[in-house]
């Protein structure tokens, strides 16, 4: 009798040839992007009972006696307790917007969703390479895929499969998704939201504020398409809504150009101002920009701010 494989499903059973090719490119992209960005393992500055000494503090009733530094206490005629840095596993939850508006692409440039998937894949790979834990949510109004927060290296494959498992469809679902994360009372950590943010901001911002109040750090990545932002039309054009295919309008773009551009920038500046007010990292970039450059700049910024 032939030996039976321990794998219930082969990759051929799970993914179409097109999806497998996308998966392979996504993994290679993530690895190539991250390899040059790592600067050592993550270290939390949370005080705890780890092995690395940080500083002394005055003894307070209730402090463990085993942490009293008897030599230093004897020299100063008062009790001092040693404080240590605790190595803690960072928990990162990546939230990916897979609504139909993410299909937008300009010419040969990657779509907003492809760049979103690249950012998500690179972040997941980075977190796992540091020995930390990562989970993902890929969401639209018709389907949401939940992947648990795990630190095993093989979890990257599950995340990549989720990212390439389907095309963006329907309307966005971010408000409900963020509320679910809140209701699940997940471990405090980083929540990275990747989206074009082309929707009513108030409901999403409300849920982000609640997540912050619960102790999470929220990071926002916004994808911008050049055609959507620049509106390079000068004649009558028929427009259709990617999230509502039945909605179509034939308009004189030349008349609307200035109004549209002004309103687009108002939305963008509104997100920036709100993020700054509530101390939220907001990274906005266009689809022609290289993901590795965007992440490199952001990681350098985090390193400078947090000393990580």
Image (cartoon, rainbow, N blue to C red):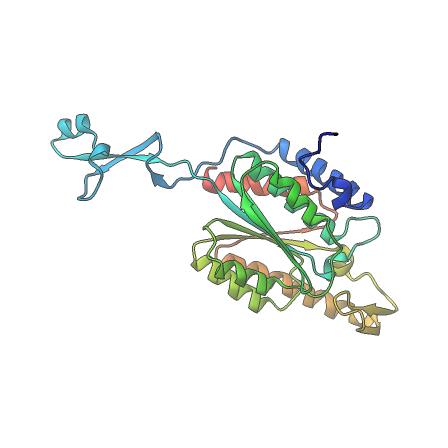
The picture places residue 116, in percent across and down from the top left corner, at 68, 50
Asked whether 58 or 120 is in front, the reply is 120
Q: Residue at x 75, y 60 (%)?
A: 228
The picture places residue 217, in percent across and down from the top left corner, at 48, 52
Q: Residue at x 65, y 44 (%)?
A: 158
Image position of 251 (left or right of 10): right
Asked whether 249 or 187 is in front, the reply is 187
Asked whether 38 or 126 is in front, the reply is 126
The picture places residue 25, in percent across and down from the top left corner, at 75, 39
Q: Residue at x 83, y 48 (%)?
A: 108
- Relative to residue 105, is residue 161 depicted above or below? above
- Relative to residue 166, is residue 56 depicted above or below? above
Total numbered labels placed on residues in the image: 0
- Relative to residue 212, is residue 33 depicted above or below? above
| Residue closest to the far front | 1
The picture places residue 194, in percent across and down from the top left corner, at 63, 53
Q: Choose top left, top right, bottom left or bottom right for residue 69.
A: top left
Q: Choose top left, top right, bottom left or bottom right for residue 11.
A: top right
Image position of 56 (left or right of 224): left
Q: Please state, as top left, top right, bottom left or bottom right, where the N terminus lies in the image.
A: top right
- Relative to residue 264, is residue 27 depicted above or below? above
Image position of 254 (left or right of 87): right
């Amino acid at each position: 009798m032939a030996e039976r494989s321990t794998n219930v499903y082969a990759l051929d059973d799970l993914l179409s040839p097109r999806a497998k090719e996308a998966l392979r490119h996504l993994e290679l992209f993530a690895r190539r992007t991250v390899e040059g960005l790592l600067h050592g393992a993550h270290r939390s500055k949370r005080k705890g009972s780890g092995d690395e000494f940080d500083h002394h503090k005055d003894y307070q009733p209730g402090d463990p006696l085993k942490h009293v530094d008897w030599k230093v206490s004897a020299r100063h005629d008062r009790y001092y307790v040693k404080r240590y840095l605790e190595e803690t596993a960072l928990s990162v939850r990546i939230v990916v917007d897979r609504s139909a508006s993410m299909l937008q692409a300009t010419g040969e440039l990657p779509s907003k969703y492809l760049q979103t998937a690249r950012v998500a894949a690179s972040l997941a790979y980075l977190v796992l390479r540091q020995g930390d834990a990562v989970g993902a949510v890929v969401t639209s109004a018709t389907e949401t895929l939940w992947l648990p927060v795990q630190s095993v290296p093989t979890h990257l494959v599950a995340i990549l499969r989720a990212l390439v498992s389907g095309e963006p469809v329907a309307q966005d679902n971010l408000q409900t998704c963020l509320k679910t994360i809140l209701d699940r009372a997940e471990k405090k950590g980083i929540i990275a939201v990747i989206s074009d943010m082309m929707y009513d901001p108030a409901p999403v911002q409300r849920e982000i504020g609640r997540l912050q109040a619960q102790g999470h750090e929220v990071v926002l990545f916004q994808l911008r398409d050049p055609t959507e932002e620049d509106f390079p039309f000068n004649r009558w054009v028929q427009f259709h809504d990617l999230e509502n295919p039945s909605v179509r309008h034939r308009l004189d773009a030349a008349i609307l150009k200035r109004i549209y551009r002004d309103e687009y920038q108002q939305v963008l500046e509104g997100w920036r101002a709100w993020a700054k007010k509530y101390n939220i990292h907001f990274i906005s970039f266009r689809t022609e920009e290289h993901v590795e450059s965007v992440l490199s700049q952001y990681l350098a910024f985090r390193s400078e701010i947090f000393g990580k």
